[in-house]
């Protein structure tokens, strides 16, 4: 199945062939927990500056075409971040997104290529305060992140 991502801000497209996701993978991949307006409200309520919120809103609009179906990959990624942030309330949203980005680049390089340009700007906006967070994250959280990212399994072996 052909996966195509068009990155308007970089004026480029990325296309890769992936094996067809099975029924459960397909369902998990395309199922969204929030409507667009719910996600925008969650972003608007985050305790961060307007520039960071604008970057997250832009990220939420990232899509890829998987076969003939559109996947709102940016929204899916942010939903996973919000879910993890709710489960681990002692971490800041910035710490959670940094951890997810780090694992995303390790787990699914293709998805990292699609989301990376915006996320790297976001992480720069957050600054160096969070840079050392990796050493403070416990093994249970690392495992939970890996479990959440399994939704992107069809993209795992693309580079």
Image: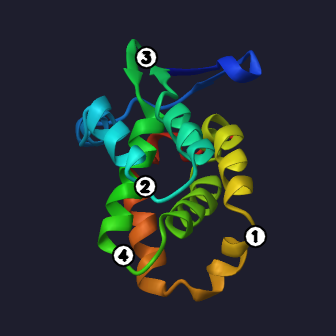
Q: Which residue is mark 3?
A: 67
Which is nearer the N-term, disc 4 or disc 3? 3
Work out whether residue 101 or residue 29 is closer to the camera in this orientation and state it.
101
Q: Residues within 10 Å of mark 3 (few under 14, many from 20)?
A: some
Which marked residue is nearer to the observer: mark 4 or mark 3?
Answer: 4
Asked which secondary structure carries label 3, the reply is loop
In this picture, residue 56 sits left or right of residue 118: left
Residue 87 sits in quarter: bottom left
Residue at 43% of width from left, 47% of height from top? Answer: 78
- In the picture, the disc for residue 105 is none
Which is nearer the N-term, disc 4 or disc 2? 2
Q: Which residue is mark 1?
A: 128
Marks 1,4: beta carbons within 8 A: no
Q: CA distance from mark 1 to mark 4?
A: 21 Å
Q: Position of residue 154 (x, y in %)?
A: 45, 40
Q: CA distance from mark 4 to mark 3?
A: 35 Å
Residue at 75% of width from left, 70% of height from top? Answer: 128
Q: CA distance from mark 2 to mark 3?
A: 34 Å
Q: Residues within 10 Å of mark 4 (few under 14, many from 20)?
A: few
Asked which secondary structure carries label 4, the reply is loop
Q: Which residue is mark 4?
A: 88
Question: Is residue 77 visible in this depiction of the protein?
Answer: yes
Q: CA distance from mark 4 to mark 2?
A: 15 Å
């Amino acid at each position: 199945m052909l996966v195509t991502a068009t990155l308007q801000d970089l004026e480029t497209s990325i296309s890769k062939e992936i094996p067809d996701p099975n029924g459960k993978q397909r369902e998990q991949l395309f199922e969204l927990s929030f409507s667009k307006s719910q996600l925008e409200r969650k972003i608007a309520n985050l305790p961060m500056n307007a520039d960071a919120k604008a970057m997250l809103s832009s990220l939420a609009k990232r899509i890829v075409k998987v076969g003939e179906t559109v996947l709102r990959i940016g929204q899916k990624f942010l939903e996973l971040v919000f879910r993890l942030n709710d489960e681990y309330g002692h971490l800041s949203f910035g710490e959670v997104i940094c951890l997810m980005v780090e694992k995303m680049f390790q787990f699914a390089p293709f998805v990292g290529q699609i989301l990376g340009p915006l996320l790297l700007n976001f992480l720069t906006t957050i600054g160096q305060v969070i840079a050392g967070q990796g050493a403070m994250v416990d093994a249970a959280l690392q495992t939970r992140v890996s479990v959440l990212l399994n939704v992107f399994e069809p993209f795992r072996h693309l580079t």
